[in-house]
Image (tube, rainbow, N blue to C red):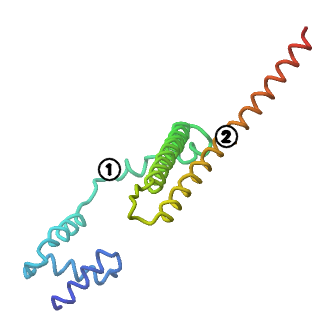
Amino acid sequence: MTLAEIKILVEKYFEGETSLQEEALLSDYFNGVDVVAELKQYQPLFQFFKGEKTVVLSEKATEKILATPKPTRHLNILRGGGRSKGLWWRAAAAVLIIGVSSYFIANRFEGFKTKRLAENSRIKVYDETDDAQKAYDEVQAALKLVSKKMKKGTDETTQSMKKVKHVTDEVNNIIQISN
């Protein structure tokens, strides 16, 4: 077998695509004495596998393994017993951590977006030699942005005040009924 063929087989072996015959060829090659220095690193692996094939369990160990009852852990989890309660808490904690961290990340991103908007909307200072119309347009755009933000804040404040007035009216009605 050529070095190129061996390299291809080794690659196939580590990809899990070799047949039993190809693995036997690799085992024979790496357990031999004519291993190329370039592939010497794989020799201990195949020698280990060869040694492990000769290991035999004692009769006592074999009996003990056969006498061991099969695990029923998966049935216990399905019934809601055993360690499944701890697993539910762990899952809930993981979901909570992901949710909280997502909230903070989203708020931090919103802060960056606001900072970038503020940096992009700064008014530039112009002198007499610059185009007056361009300066006027930029000032007008900045004032529109400020106006928009103020209107948004005013609208939110108005909505909040309406809610407070509604609650105050309800409290006054309750007070009048109780008197």
Label 2 and label 1: CA atoms lie apart by: 81 Å
The type of residue carrying mark 1 is: Ala
Judged left or right of residue 164, residue 95 is left
- Furthest-front residue in view? 128
The residue identified by callout 1 is 61
- The secondary element bearing badge 1 is classed as helix
Circle 1: is it few (<14), some (14-19), or many (20+) Cα within 10 Å? few
Residue 18 in the figure: left or right of residue 137: left
List the single residue furthest toward the top.
179
For the point 56% across and 52% down, which residue is it?
Answer: 143
Q: Along the polypeptide, which appears first: circle 2 or circle 1?
A: 1
Quadrant placement of the C terminus? top right
Q: Is residue 73 left or right of residue 165?
A: left
Element marked by disc 2: helix
Please say if 31 is above or below 61.
below
Label ID, residue 13: none
- CA neighbours of label 2 inside 10 A, class few (<14), some (14 to 19), many (20+): few
Of circles 2 and 1, which is in front?
2
Mark 2 residue type? Thr
Give the residue number, with chain letter if any, for mark 2. 154
Q: Position of residue 88 (x, y in %)?
A: 55, 40
Quadrant (top left, top right, bottom left, bottom right) of the N terminus: bottom left
Residue 165: x and y in percent read: 78, 27
Q: Residue at x 25, y 66 (%)?
A: 53
Q: Is residue 83 above or below residue 36?
A: above
Residue at image coords 32%, 50%: 61
Q: Return the residue nearer the eye: 158 or 175.
A: 158
Residue 19 position in % (x across, y down): 34, 82
Q: Which residue occupies the extreme bottom position in the image?
A: 2
In the figure, 109 relative to 131: above or below?
above
Q: Residue at x 71, y 34 (%)?
A: 160
